[in-house]
Image: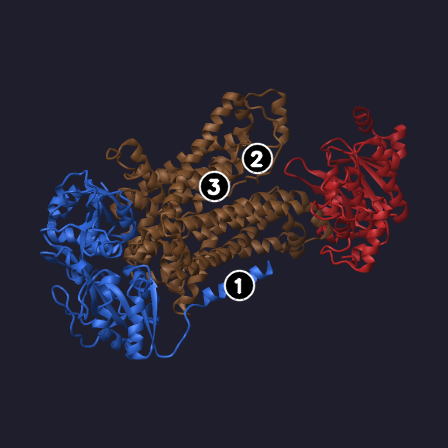
Chain colours: A blue, B red, C brown
Amino acid sequence: MRTLLYALVSAAAVVLAGPALAKDKLTVYTYESFTADWGPGPVVKKEFEAECGCDVEFVSVADGVALLNRVRLEGASTKADIVLGLDTNLTADAKASGLFAPHGPVTDVNVPGGWSDDTFVPFDYGYFAVVYDTEKLKTPPKSLKELVEGSADDKIVIQDPRTSTPGLGLLLWVKSVYGDKAPEAWAKLKAKVLTVTPGWSEAYGLFTKGEAPMVLSYTTSPAYHMVAENTERYQAASFEEGEYLQIEVAGITTTGAKNPLAAEFMAFMTGPKFQDAIPETNWMFPAGKTDKPLNPAFGKLVKPTKTLLFSSEEVAANRKAWVDEWLAVMSK
Amino acid sequence: MRDSAASRLEKGAPVRLDKVSFSYGEAPLVFDVEFAAAKITAIMGPSGSGKSTLLNLVAGFETPQSGRVLIGGADVSVEPPSMRPVSMVFQENNLFAHLTVAQNVGLGRSPSLRLTEADHAAITEALERTGLAGKEKRLPRELSGGERQRVALARVLVRDRPVLLLDEPFASLGPALRDDMLDMVAAVHAERGMTVLFVTHQPEDARRIGQNMVFLDDGLVAATGKADDFFAGAGPEAFRRYIGAST
Amino acid sequence: MQRATSDPRITAGIAALAAIALLIGGAFAGLLFEGVHDLSGAWAAFDPYLLRVVRFTLWQAALSALLSVVPALFVARALSRHPRFPGRAFILQLFAVPLALPAIVAALGILALYGRAGYFAGVIGGGSWPGIYGLSGILVAHVFFNLPLATRLFLEALQTIPTDQWRLASQLGMAARSAFRLIEWPTLRAALPGVAGLVFMLCITSFTIILTLGGGPAATTLEVGIYQALRFDFDPARAVTLTLLQIALTFIVMLALTRLGANVVGDTNLPVAQRRYLSVGGGETWLNAMLIVLALLFVVGPMAATVMAGLGADLDRLAGEATVRQATLTSVVLGFLSALLSVMLSLALTMARRALALNSRAGRKTLLEHAADTGASFVLVVPPIVVGAGWFLLLRHVGDVFAIAPVMVVTVNAVMAMPFALRAIRPAYDAASERHERLCAQLGIVGWNRLMLVDWPSLRRPLATAFAFAMALSLGDLGVIALFGSDSVQTLPYLLLARMGSYRTEDAAGLALLLGLVCLSLIVAAHWLGREKLRDA
């Protein structure tokens, strides 16, 4: 009993002690799947540490939304030098918090529609897409219109825009295609919605369990199944109206503005050593120059005919009203 | 605890309830009575007449709404039970089921069971005195009902307080066993000379060891006197009816 | 009265209450302090949509409570009438597991059975089965969580019926029906409002189940609104407003139940093995066996589905992963500490409540007594994310907020497990106190002495039960960890969700199995430990 107690107490000490301190350190806040063993984190850490001769410490939270909130909760006293993993739907709110500093000059950024933002720098991007199960659905919808007006028997799992970024992505997608007619579109789409989950994980879990033949995810999702599971069963549907874009960005905090390593990291981030890691670890498209060619699997992915994107200011200004509009229709 | 002022009282302190009133929210009980020092007083009365309440007031389990409880002349009305110069034996639950006989007795010396050599000696002696020698390590569930009450008496011996309250402690024992126990109480009383308040339903118990008698009826002290006189027919009418009805 | 205030048990109870009040109050203070800059959110919370949300929140909670509690009455009775039902002890242990499962694990388990691609759909004939999304899904999940809980609680109540009553009943030749009416029902009736209240509170705060199985925003609860306010909008004022509304609504419902004679903490007793003098007829035996088997199938089904899915995962690789081991260790350590704290707080409250009750036997209950009595269970309806966020805001000016993450997880989970720990500890303590109170007072056994010499031996078993239950509950937590989790503090459920979030569904299923097994072994261990200890006592 005594040794057990001792073991527990020392284990508690290890758990409670948290990350160790070191000199010349760069602290990066990011989301969970970035730092996972199979994510880009380990490669990025190794490469940048070799370049700067410093220590990189990743602190990861569940997702992009949790990331912004973590920084907002910590306020000006945050330990983060860099916050990596917000998307453009969050950047206006992030700027409004006053916790981010403008970055230095950035070159070689390549995202659809170009980039000009003085605070945030993109590191990858992807498109939201309806991913379907080829064994269950022989004729996938060819447009958002077909999805909205198609048979109610072909169900789709979507995410709640109040709690998840892909959920918000679909909301914006429908808005950008239908404009003022969005409520009518949702009223029709509602019949096809099997369920609305709190996050992407739950939705994708239901989809792969076979609960529904379609799920809202990314055009790059099939690449994972092709590369990691060697199956072409899951495919993204290509929509005539185009796909809605998600750009993931990083920014320097007011804390990081005092740390020269932060600017160095931002430059590194858009370079090939970082960007090479992105496609097959984060399953997104690189936003900067790469040295290696993309895995052929990425060549098989849906190429959007048109890129849809609201500016982050538009999103920030209208999100509440649009979500309420969605709620009014969906809760009838 | 052993050195508290209370327990250094003279052996056999008088117990007095001075216009003590108490109520459970119904009709109030009012006790105004004195129990003579170093005597065994039997307390009798019909069910609900307040016998147990009277003992609880003396022991400190209940606090009077008015009036005073005096032991050896000192007002103990607001003293907690453990600070009063009193030991009490209940009808049941006198022992902690998970503690051994010796430990249960030892609690009479130290509530934390930190016992000295002298304490151990006293415990052994008390157990011998109550016929429990050799059963020190037993648990209460391994004892008979009579033996359990003997353990309680052994604890009374080691506690050595000037007042002993007995709340029908032998009611569930057979007649022969009950007589043995009563004789043991009488012997302990003869040796230590404490004041004993003895609640019982059995007239023969009261007759066997009772010296004085207090008869309660309907929450009041109806009569007091020598036990012998009561049984000789000098008691009040209510007492005679009670005896008649109960035997 | 002088004695009352100096009783260390009451002091301990006041300290425990103060700690809980500090935890909740501090969180509100932190949120309000931050939210006071912009109170518009508080008013904006009262939009037309809110009324619908409130209505649905109450409606689903009431229905869930009804559907869990009524069948539980009969299952508990069936179990109580067949003390030697094959595997009875194991059934009861299985019944303790659902509550400890993370909601997402349970939801996926339920879908594996009743979903559109579930086993059930396979039997019915593919394609035609619509699945169980919507209110029906929510109810199935809530009943899965709460029917076993209610059954256990009712069974405990039934076991308080004195053996003599059964002897009498059998001597008088009472048939099953009259025995139920005259003996079992009065006991169940007394326990009913308390159990219903607890289930209601658990359902009112349901979140993942509602969102995953609810089908859409038509089925949404206040808890979702609170979550959104903190997670997406970062609107502390709105979060506080909605939380207060949730507490107020629950309070009204509890008040109504109290009018029906509820004691929200419950006066049920510890299950004790009794000799029963029962003669159960052949027909009734059949009926009871059917009831038990049906309930068992209902509860075991989703668990079995979880096991099946888990066995499909690469368990060897998972078990070898450093991350999994670290997460398991973290979960166990945090769960252990939080269970310890939970049991200590509950014991303090139990002792204080008893001491207060003894002091005011004749008088009216004091405010303090009420607080120690039922107040503690209201923590169930304070969303953990609110407590977490509030303290984060409060402490960020003071020091390293990273360091408080594990502390927050431990404390919040400890408090959330209290209503259950109280149920296990209180009846045993009260019964022991009934036997020992006067003796302790007489012999001056108080405070630490009393705890070690008198209370500990008779409470070991219920304390072990409470501890295991609290630990199982904490192990499954995703509420606090969702806000505080990071790569430095990863628990098993957190890792499970992370795996799901990176396409690794199989890993997640494996972790769900692991988590379920840890919970089950805790419950079994508690049962076993409790029995062992009792023997040498």
Comparing A97 with C70, the one in front is C70
Asked whether C141 or C528 is in front, the reply is C528
SS under mark 3: helix
**Quarter of the image where the C terminus of chain B is located:** top right
Location of residue B25 in the rendering, given as x and y in whole percent from the top left corner: 63, 38
Query: Do the residues at discs 3 and 2 belong to one chain?
Result: yes
Relative placement, left or right, of C239 versus B114 is left
Would residue C385 be visible to someone looking at this image?
no
Q: Earlier in the sequence, mark 3 or mark 2?
A: 3
Chain for disc number 2: C
Residue that appears at 84% across and 49% down: B126
> Does residue C75 lie above or below C526 as drawn?
above
Residue C220, how many percent across, how many down?
30, 44
Q: Quadrant of residue B27?
A: top right
Read off the chain for label 1: A
**Distance between mark 1 and mark 3 Cα atoms:** 30 Å
| Real-space CA distance between mark 2 and mark 1, rounded to the nearest whole angstrom | 39 Å
Q: Are marks 2 and 1 in contact (CB under 8 Å)?
A: no
Q: Quadrant of residue A228?
A: bottom left
Residue C531 percent across, percent down from the top left = 60, 44
On the question of residue A312 being in view, the answer is: yes
Looking at the rendered structure, the kind of residue marked 1 is Val
Q: Which mark is residue C94?
A: 3
Question: Where in the figure is residue C30, as x and y percent of width and height?
Answer: 39, 61
Residue labelled with disc 2: C159
Q: Amino acid at mark 3?
A: Leu
Q: Chain of mark 3?
A: C
What residue sits right under mark 1 in the picture? A9
Q: Residue at x 60, y 49 (%)?
A: C460
Residue type at mark 2 is Gln
